[in-house]
Image (cartoon, rainbow, N blue to C red):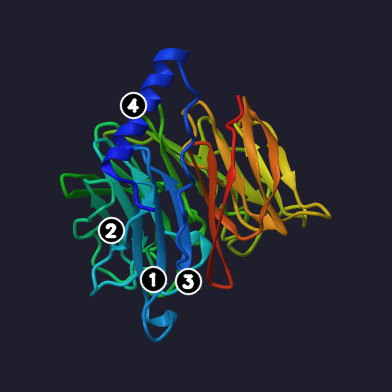
Amino acid sequence: MKRTAYGVLLLSFCITAIVSCAGSVEPVPTEPVPIPDLGELELPQIAAAPDGGLLMAWTVPRPGGFFRGFDLFVGTTRDNTFSDPVQVNSADVPLHSIPIDEMRPAIAFGPNGAVALAWTDDFFDIRVATSSDGGQSFAPSVRLNQDEGDALQEFPDIAFGPDGVLHAVWLDPRIAEEGFEEPADLYYARLVDGVVSEQNLTASQESSVCGCCLPNINVEADGSLAVVFRNTTPTGYRDPFRVVGTSDGRFEEPTPVSPPIWQIEACPIAGPIAVDDMTLWFDGSTGQKRLLSAWDPDQAPDVVVEDTDEWLLDYPPRRISGTPAETTILLVPAQPSSYLLNREGHAWTVIADDLPGWAASGAVHEGRLYLVGTDLSAFQSETRDFEIPD
């Protein structure tokens, strides 16, 4: 039965009367946001937007299969419902045709409804598209790498500063032979009013950065920048390094986050992430997959979690968005069940170990945890009640 205007007024009067007589009433919880079934896709991500809504991004292969490239779509919530998808990339520039987890498009939120997504296009250029209305529409994308060659630029990450400047990093093998991902450098760019300025953050080092590991950039509370990436050394180690900078693009030299650990002749395809002064990363140096954390380059890192008879770590951790600034919760994709970590100082505690193994991205919104991922390219989602730890 449809609710009439009279019924709405009567309901409002009754609620007002209850409040007046009883003093207060318990707030009525909102219904969970229904996640639409998106069918066949790749690299879904969900994030909590500063305006209190949710944003979901995903890629879809073009007709003819993966090798025709992908298109990038975004949906945002309005009135507790996801909008119709908005295509972010232009029709003439598809996304790169290999949808591995480390190639997932980067998402960043800025002030005044700003949203940005960055990706590698099918010509191996780094592109970013920005929105000024919370993701309801996007301006044409901008190319971040400023070279004119055919290098395999890949793996971008982005972050907004409080002043609205967009900061980006990516892996750039423009010094390598054509078609090779190493040797490569770590490049950085600032995007201000549509104008790009780029610089090489590893120009002074002789060794290559690790060519297939996603770097991570964060804007700290004081406005400074922290970038972590997997580097290589002349002796064959591939461990995380950290470089810090200022919001105007001045950076120090990269430094290791721990003593050398993993000596490997191939790329792990697993980049680190920064959480304040800590760096977390995926390690296989013992022959057993494990997640490490370090904050003192002169000390051995802590082992956060490692493979057990019940768990098999699959990917590096990623943040659960939508938590308070003082709280950091990480999703660690694993099989058969993914799990959550909660930060307590420099220590990490497992607070959930029963998340679905397909979970690749998560967000907290109005007391609920939203998870998305894929199972054999079929979209999967789950919503559960969630209380943010104190």
Q: Quadrant of residue 88?
A: bottom left
Q: Which amino acid does label 3 sit on?
A: Gly
Q: Which of 309 and 183 is in front in this view?
A: 309
Q: Which amino acid does label 2 sit on?
A: Asn
Residue that numbered label 2 is attached to: 145
Query: Badges 3 and 2: C-beta atoms under 8 Å apart?
Result: no
Residue 154, image x and y in percent?
A: 40, 62
Q: In this view, does 46 lie to the left or right of 286?
A: left
Query: Badges 1 and 3: C-beta atoms under 8 Å apart?
Result: no
Of mark 3 and mark 4, the one earlier in the sequence is 4
Q: In which quarter of the image is residue 6?
A: top left
Residue that numbered label 4 is attached to: 13
Residue that numbered label 3 is attached to: 39
Q: Is mark 2 on a helix, strand or loop?
A: loop
Residue 123, image x and y in percent?
A: 31, 72
Residue that numbered label 1 is attached to: 96
Q: What residue type is labelled 1?
A: His
Of mark 3 and mark 2, the one earlier in the sequence is 3
Q: Is mark 4 on a helix, strand or loop?
A: helix
Q: Quadrant of the C terminus?
A: top right
Q: Is mark 3 on a helix, strand or loop?
A: loop
Q: What element carries label 1?
A: loop
| C-alpha distance separating marks 1 and 3 | 20 Å
Q: Nearer the viewer, mark 4 or mark 1?
A: 4
Q: Which of marks 3 and 4 is in front?
A: 4
Of mark 1 and mark 2, the one earlier in the sequence is 1
